[in-house]
Image (cartoon, rainbow, N blue to C red):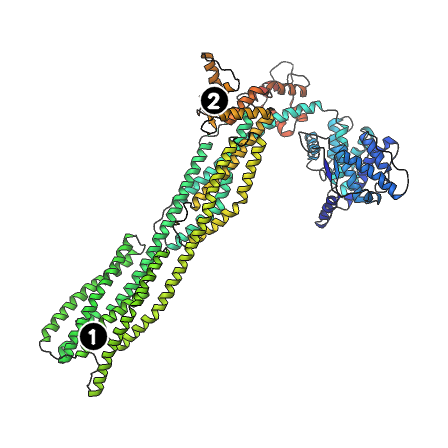
């Protein structure tokens, strides 16, 4: 615990107010504190022949407060002012506060006025700070804070006792057994613990308090009724009273120090075993998760729909966001645990840990690499399959659209071609039928391209393995068969008309010219309408701009089309004029075509309506592609900044790990944590890029020419950077642990690092045997050039490279050099510690272990110690010498 302490009474009051709001503050606490602190003060003031009754009243003039500080510190304070005025009292209290501050205690926001005014909360807080400084601060158990050390002391001393479980300083002491156990542990002659009952707390408390007051010179500072009736006793009051027990029993420390040494050694073994078990558990869990995940990433079903793939892509995103990050942390944690375990084993002279077969760090790295490869191929397959299915959906809709138009056009054509109506026609009607048939043949030829387009689309759907190819093929075959029949029927009807044509002569030129001009114009109108509603799919601005240019070219032809339209209408107008002028029966009926001016006009109006609609559609698509281009640029701008930054950070972390930016380990650790903080602070950028990347994928953007970085490469780089920082931090912390535990100086560590880097020419953080040998020689290590020198060097190689990798890492090099320069704990020291606990006997009894050691470590020793085979020993005597030796040799421990 550090010397400087800081007490802020405002914090003290604010904490109590917060407890009161939450219903946690017992009103009896202040009463308990007042009574306990008054008794504690009197236990010291009686040495000066005085006492106090009201703690908030009798300290107001500062005289007894100064006297209290002189008694507990053994020092003389400045002479007090004897006047009774307020300023005299404030001056005396200030002298006391100044003395407290001179002992390293910082009292924040408190002045003498509060004490002079009799502020109970401030007075209690000040007395608590004095108790902390002069009664509790010096308590030290295993380098813990005073409070934690005092609690651990209580736990160890009361561990063997039934019905005692000390976990805190409020509820654990309510039944009085803990106080009785502390007394019995050190003075078993004062009470019989076996006669005590947990069900009689008042008796237990009064017994402990009476014995402590009578035999241990510890005054009654607590009220048994208050402890029993208060749900949660005041922690400060109990700590003050328990600290008196600690100081009263401070004499029996030699055995405790010996027990502490044994506890320390056993604690190292237990912690190592825990780390091994945790590593095996984490490794098994991670490898099992990878094994379960790989089949899902490797699945490649070909009968998907676009909706199925969208669902799979969303599942993959959920996997990347929610399922994988905890596993990345788990992998980093088990690697850190493995490195920490090996370092602790080396520092405690234990053999290196070899994981179970298939669970080494290399096995984990290979499995993880395989997982990342499967992730990449799975995402690539998803995107490719989405492009394929999008293309299939587009082709299927286009096929249906063209097939519907064609079947609508062919409806009734077979019945019309099989009709024998021409055999009963007049001459002009026959001529009309012939011309009508010629126009039909022209229209039929024009539709040949549409049939070929339908067949080509069906063939492409089959080539791309469309899931409903059977329905497409059936409909396509039906269209082709019907088309063949129409060709045959057309030829047959034309031959029949030509045979009958010799009998017919007259023709209506105007109807004929209308039919000839209206038919191609109608076909052009049909094609124009079809093109204006034709569906399209584009991925770039250039593609949509090409469609816009083609559409603009089409609009440029509308002027000529309008002239043709007016010319065709003029023919109809002329026919109407002649028929009306000469009253020709049936003169308005055109025998050569089914087309009418109304049909042409309707289709022409449709074209004029569809043109602006097509303009809007193309412009909307252009806007979409412009938005997609903006997304590409946004992603590229972020990626081109984050990618090089990650690479730069990786190089900087590697340079720090090799000591290229200074050899002081704390500076290296500070720089690494700064890099770690910088990486964590930039996590928002990666999250923002993930959102942009999601928008890119949702917009069906599959390429980006503005950057070479993909989201996958940035994710992997980010994860590798975090792993590298954590691994390097772990290595530096292990080097600090080695330095501090072995007691080597910073200059020695700098010399070791400088020599290692000098011979590490390739900056790989490792040395081959020849480089290692040269490094040892440069540090003054003598290696002979004869046969014996080779044998000695091979022995050293076996120590620093136990796995025969052919390279020596810096951690192994540092461990070897520190072992050569620093002494370590030995089995003999542990044997001496056990001998103290056994009272110089060559054996130790189980009850001695249970009395001096914590329960778990006592059981640990009893289970592993061999029976003592010497003479004149009890039957349950244990051999602590062989056990201590096994801790530093080859054993299951």
- Helix or strand or loop: what does disc 2 sit on? helix
Q: How far across and how far down the image is residue 836, in percent?
A: 67, 19
Relative to 181, 446 lies left or right: left
Q: Is residue 204 visible?
A: no
Residue 132 in the image: above or below residue 476: above
The residue lying toward the viewer, choosing from 872 and 729, is: 729
Relative to 227, 858 lies left or right: left
Q: Is residue 245 visible?
A: yes
**Quadrant location of residue 306?**
bottom left
**Quadrant location of residue 70?**
top right
Relative to 168, 811 lies left or right: left
- View extreme (right): residue: 83
Residue 18 in the image: above or below residue 247: below
Relative to 368, 587 lies left or right: left
Rate crowding at label 1 as few (under 14), some (14 to 19) or many (20 or more) other CA atoms within 10 Å.
many
Q: Which residue is disc 2 drawn over?
A: 772
Q: How far across and how far down the image is residue 527, in percent?
A: 27, 67
Q: How far across and how far down the image is residue 832, in percent?
A: 64, 18
Numbered circle sitting on residue 515: 1
The residue lying toward the viewer, choosing from 742 and 851, is: 742
Residue 784 in the image: above or below residue 808: above
Q: Residue at x 44, y 25 (%)?
A: 805
Residue 817 in the image: above or below residue 99: above
- Helix or strand or loop: what does disc 1 sit on? helix
Q: What is the quadrant of the C terminus in the image?
A: top right
């Amino acid at each position: 615990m550090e010397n400087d302490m800081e007490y802020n009474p405002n914090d003290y009051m604010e904490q109590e107010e917060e407890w009161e709001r939450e219903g946690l503050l017992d009103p009896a606490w202040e009463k308990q504190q007042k009574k306990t602190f008054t008794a504690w003060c009197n236990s010291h003031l009686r040495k000066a022949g005085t006492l106090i009754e009201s703690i908030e009243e009798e300290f107001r003039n500062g005289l007894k407060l100064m006297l209290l500080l002189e008694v507990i510190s053994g020092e003389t304070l400045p002479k007090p002012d004897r006047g009774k005025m307020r300023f005299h009292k404030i001056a005396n209290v200030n002298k006391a506060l100044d003395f407290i501050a001179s002992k390293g205690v910082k009292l924040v926001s408190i002045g003498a006025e509060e004490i002079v005014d009799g502020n109970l909360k401030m007075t209690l807080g000040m007395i608590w700070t004095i108790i902390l400084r002069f009664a509790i601060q010096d308590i030290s158990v295993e380098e813990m804070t005073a409070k934690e050390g005092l609690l651990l002391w209580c736990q160890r001393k009361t561990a063997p006792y039934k019905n005692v479980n000390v976990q805190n300083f409020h509820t654990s002491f309510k039944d009085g057994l803990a106080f009785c156990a502390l007394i019995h542990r050190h003075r078993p002659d004062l009470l019989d613990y076996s006669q005590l009952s947990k069900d009689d707390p008042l008796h237990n408390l009064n017994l402990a308090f009476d014995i402590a007051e009578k035999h241990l010179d510890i005054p009654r500072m607590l009220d048994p009724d208050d402890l029993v009736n208060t749900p949660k006793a005041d922690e400060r009051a109990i700590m003050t009273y328990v600290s008196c027990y600690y100081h009263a029993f401070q004499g029996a420390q030699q055995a405790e120090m010996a027990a502490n040494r044994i506890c320390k050694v056993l604690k190292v073994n237990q912690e190592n075993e825990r780390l091994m078990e945790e590593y095996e558990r984490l490794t098994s869990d991670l490898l099992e998760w990878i094994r379960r995940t790989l089949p899902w990433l490797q699945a490649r079903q070909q009968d998907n729909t676009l909706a199925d793939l969208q669902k799979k892509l969303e599942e993959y995103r959920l996997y990347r966001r929610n399922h994988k990050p905890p596993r990345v942390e788990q992998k980093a944690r088990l690697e850190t645990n493995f490195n920490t375990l090996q370092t602790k084993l080396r520092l405690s002279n234990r053999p290196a840990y070899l994981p179970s077969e298939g669970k080494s760090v290399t096995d984990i790295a290979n499995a993880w690499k395989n997982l990342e490869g499967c992730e990449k191929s799975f995402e690539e397959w998803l995107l490719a399959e989405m492009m394929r299915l999008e293309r299939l959906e587009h082709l299927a809709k286009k096929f249906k659209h063209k097939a519907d138009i064609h079947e609508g056009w062919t409806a009734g054509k077979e019945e019309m071609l099989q009709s024998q109506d021409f055999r009963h026609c007049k001459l002009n009607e026959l001529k009309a039928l012939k011309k009508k048939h010629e126009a039909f043949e022209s229209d039929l030829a024009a539709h040949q391209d549409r049939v070929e387009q339908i067949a080509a689309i069906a063939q492409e759907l089959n080539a791309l393995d469309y899931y409903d190819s059977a329905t497409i093929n059936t409909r396509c075959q039906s269209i082709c068969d019907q088309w063949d029949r129409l060709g045959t029927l057309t030829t047959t009807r034309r031959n029949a008309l030509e045979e009958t044509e010799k009998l017919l002569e007259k023709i209506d030129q105007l109807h004929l010219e209308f039919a000839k001009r209206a038919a191609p114009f109608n076909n052009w109108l049909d094609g124009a309408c079809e093109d204006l509603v034709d569906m399209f799919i584009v991925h770039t601005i250039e593609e949509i701009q090409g469609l816009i240019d083609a559409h603009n070219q089409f609009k440029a032809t509308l002027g000529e089309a309008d002239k043709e339209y007016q010319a065709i209408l003029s023919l109809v107008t002329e026919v109407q004029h002649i028929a009306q002028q000469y009253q020709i029966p049936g003169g308005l009926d055109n025998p050569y075509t089914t087309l009418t001016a109304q049909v042409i006009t309707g289709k022409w109006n449709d074209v004029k309506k569809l043109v602006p609609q097509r303009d809007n559609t193309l412009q909307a698509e252009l806007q979409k592609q412009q938005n997609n281009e903006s997304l590409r640029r946004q992603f590229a701008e972020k990626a081109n900044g984050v990618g090089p930054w990650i690479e730069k950070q990786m190089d900087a972390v590697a340079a720090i790990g090799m000591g290229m930016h200074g050899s002081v380990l704390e500076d290296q650790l500070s720089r690494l944590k700064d890099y770690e903080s910088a990486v964590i602070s930039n996590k928002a950028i990666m999250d923002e890029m993930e959102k942009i990347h999601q928008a890119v994928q949702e917009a069906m953007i599959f390429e980006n020419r503005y950057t070479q970085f993909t989201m996958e490469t940035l994710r992997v780089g980010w994860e590798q950077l975090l792993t590298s920082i954590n691994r390097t931090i772990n290595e530096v912390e292990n080097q600090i642990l080695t330095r501090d535990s072995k007691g080597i100086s910073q200059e020695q560590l700098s010399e070791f690092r400088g020599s290692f880097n000098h011979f590490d020419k390739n900056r790989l953080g490792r040395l081959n045997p020849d480089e290692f040998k040269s490094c040892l020689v440069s540090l003054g290590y003598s290696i002979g050039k004869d046969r014996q020198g080779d044998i000695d060097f091979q022995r050293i190689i076996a120590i620093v490279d136990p796995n025969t990798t052919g390279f020596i890492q810096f951690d192994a090099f540092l461990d070897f050099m520190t072992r050569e320069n620093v002494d370590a704990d030995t089995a003999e020291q542990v044997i001496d510690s056990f001998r103290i606990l056994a009272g110089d006997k060559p054996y130790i009894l189980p009850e001695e272990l249970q009395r001096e050691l914590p329960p778990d470590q006592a059981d640990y020793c009893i289970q592993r110690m061999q029976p003592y085979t010497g003479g004149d020993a009890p039957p349950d005597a244990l051999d602590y010498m062989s056990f201590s030796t096994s801790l530093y040799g080859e054993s299951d421990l």
